[in-house]
């Protein structure tokens, strides 16, 4: 909403900047030609000029991934298929998120491959009963909420890990709040049930107090006892995820130009900017022209979640992408464009816009500071 400037607005509705400034001035609002208009100012202007003002990022459509539902009439769904669910694991530190993910992964990888895996990977896709599931490890839930606030909803299902010997902790409570706000189905994995001190009823009672009542207590949250150590309960957990996924009827179009969420990024020596992504729609291929917030480029190389070089990534699959001109921000969306010019133009426009906004912010602050001094 605060992304349109006075002169841009004037241009868009066929007025002069002076007319816009005058209207606002008469109501005691001081703006200059280059200022960004606030939501309330836009509403006033809309009324004053008798036009309907709907504001959105001019480039929003580029990033829009969208929720598709069966039966949506205005969408040609002939090429839509069921896509794998993306599952985010959250929970208090040391309750076993990483261990659980590692166990799921190793139990789902052919033994020949498993030996080769040494380094921890924060997202990967596994298969259960011929159906794929993509998991994401959230080191903290900071990344998760950052993505949500950017409107990048990558997660379909949230798993909250609670150590059954430790119970609900402050971070568990925070995670519950985040998970609820996401609107995603939530599954509770009570981990470390191999421990003698594990107390499942304690966990259920504490969680019920936080509004997460177990199904077997008459509520509607699934609680599954698991052990990342022994592997107990993991099949049960995976089955539950697939049941939830089926209810969600997740669909996407593998023939579309790809859109993918950036879940991690870094600058690697000898490789340049590296983006770890999850494909949300379409298929991402080597050679694709991509734009990602203010960065752009052409896909040079793709590796899958096993670190193998691949030519493409399909729906809900995760891997790393090389070829961007700079390190993209986590939580942004990577989008395939028709041409490299288009990708470059969008990235450049965004960068300029972001700079202008920063600049106008800092001018405003210093003006306010100054008036405070007078
Ligand atoms: P995270 O911080 O949530 O990612 O937790 P980690 O996966 O790093 O695990 C924290 C500690 O708990 C490690 O020492 C793990 O070995 C241990 N741990 C994790 N899961 C289990 C489990 O199911 N049983 C037992 N006994 N220990 C576990
Ligand atoms: Mg961890």
Image (spheres, rainbow, N blue to C red):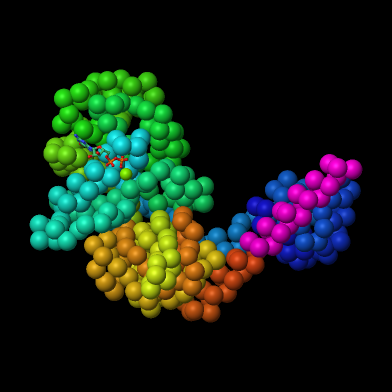
Q: Position of residue 155 (x, y in %)?
A: 38, 48
Q: Magenta stretch?
A: 354-374
Q: Quadrant of residue 215?
A: top left
Q: Is residue 48 visible?
A: no
Q: Quadrant of residue 59?
A: bottom right
Q: Is residue 283 left or right of residue 328?
A: left
Q: Residue at x 84, y 50 (%)?
A: 30
Q: Is residue 343 above or below residue 99?
A: below
The rendered magenta stretch, by its main secondary structure, is classed as helix
Q: Residue at x 16, y 25 (%)?
A: 196
For residue 94: magenta?
no
The front one of 172 and 345 is 172
How many numbered marks have been drawn onto this rendered protein structure?
Answer: 0
Q: Position of residue 71 (x, y in %)?
A: 38, 53
Q: Ligand 1 quadrant? A: top left
The front one of 75 and 135 is 135
Q: Residue at x 61, y 56 (%)?
A: 56
The quadrant of the image that shows the C terminus is top right
Q: Is residue 328 left or right of residue 320?
A: right
The front one of 162 and 266 is 266
Q: Position of residue 7 (x, y in %)?
A: 77, 63
Q: Residue at x 27, y 31 (%)?
A: 163
Q: Is residue 104 visible?
A: yes
Farthest residue, direction front: 269
The front one of 166 and 2 is 166
Q: Is residue 259 above or below residue 207?
A: below
Q: Quadrant of residue 218?
A: top left
For residue 365: magenta?
yes
Q: Is residue 225 left or right of residue 23?
A: left
Q: Is residue 324 left or right of residue 85?
A: right
Farthest residue, direction left: 111
Q: Position of residue 166 (x, y in %)?
A: 29, 26
């Amino acid at each position: 909403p605060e992304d349109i400037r006075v002169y841009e607005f004037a241009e868009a509705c066929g007025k002069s900047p002076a007319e816009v400034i005058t209207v606002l001035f008469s109501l005691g609002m001081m703006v200059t030609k280059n200022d960004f208009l606030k939501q309330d100012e836009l509403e006033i202007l809309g009324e004053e000029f008798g036009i309907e003002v709907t504001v959105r990022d001019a480039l929003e459509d580029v990033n829009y991934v969208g929720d598709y539902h069966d039966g949506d009439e205005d969408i040609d769904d002939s090429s839509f298929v069921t896509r794998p669910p993306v599952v985010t694991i959250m929970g208090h530190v040391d309750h076993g998120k990483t261990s659980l993910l590692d166990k799921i992964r190793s139990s789902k990888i052919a033994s020949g491959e498993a030996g080769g895996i040494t380094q921890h990977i924060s997202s990967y896709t596994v298969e259960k009963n011929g159906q794929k599931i993509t998991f994401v490890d959230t080191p903290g839930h900071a990344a998760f909420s950052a993505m949500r606030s950017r409107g990048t909803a990558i997660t379909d299902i949230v798993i909250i890990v609670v150590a059954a010997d430790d119970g609900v902790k402050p971070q568990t409570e925070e995670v519950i709040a985040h998970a609820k706000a996401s609107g995603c189905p939530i599954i509770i994995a009570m981990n470390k049930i191999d421990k003698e001190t594990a107390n499942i009823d304690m966990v259920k009672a504490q969680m019920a107090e936080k509004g997460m009542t177990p199904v077997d207590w008459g509520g509607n949250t699934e609680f599954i006892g698991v052990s990342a150590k022994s592997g107990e309960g993991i099949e049960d957990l995976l089955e539950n995820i697939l049941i939830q996924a089926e209810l969600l009827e997740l669909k996407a179009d593998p023939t579309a130009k790809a859109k993918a969420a950036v879940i991690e990024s870094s600058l690697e020596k000898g490789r340049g900017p590296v983006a770890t992504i999850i494909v949300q729609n379409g298929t991402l291929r080597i050679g694709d022209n991509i734009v990602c917030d203010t960065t752009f480029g052409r896909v040079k190389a793709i590796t899958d979640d096993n670190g193998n070089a691949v030519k493409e990534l399909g729906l809900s699959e995760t891997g790393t992408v090389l070829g961007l001109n700079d390190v993209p921000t986590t939580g942004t969306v990577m989008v395939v464009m028709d041409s490299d010019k288009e990708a470059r133009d969008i990235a450049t426009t965004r960068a300029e816009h972001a700079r202008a906004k920063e600049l106008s912010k800092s001018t405003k602050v210093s003006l306010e500071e100054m008036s405070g001094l007078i």
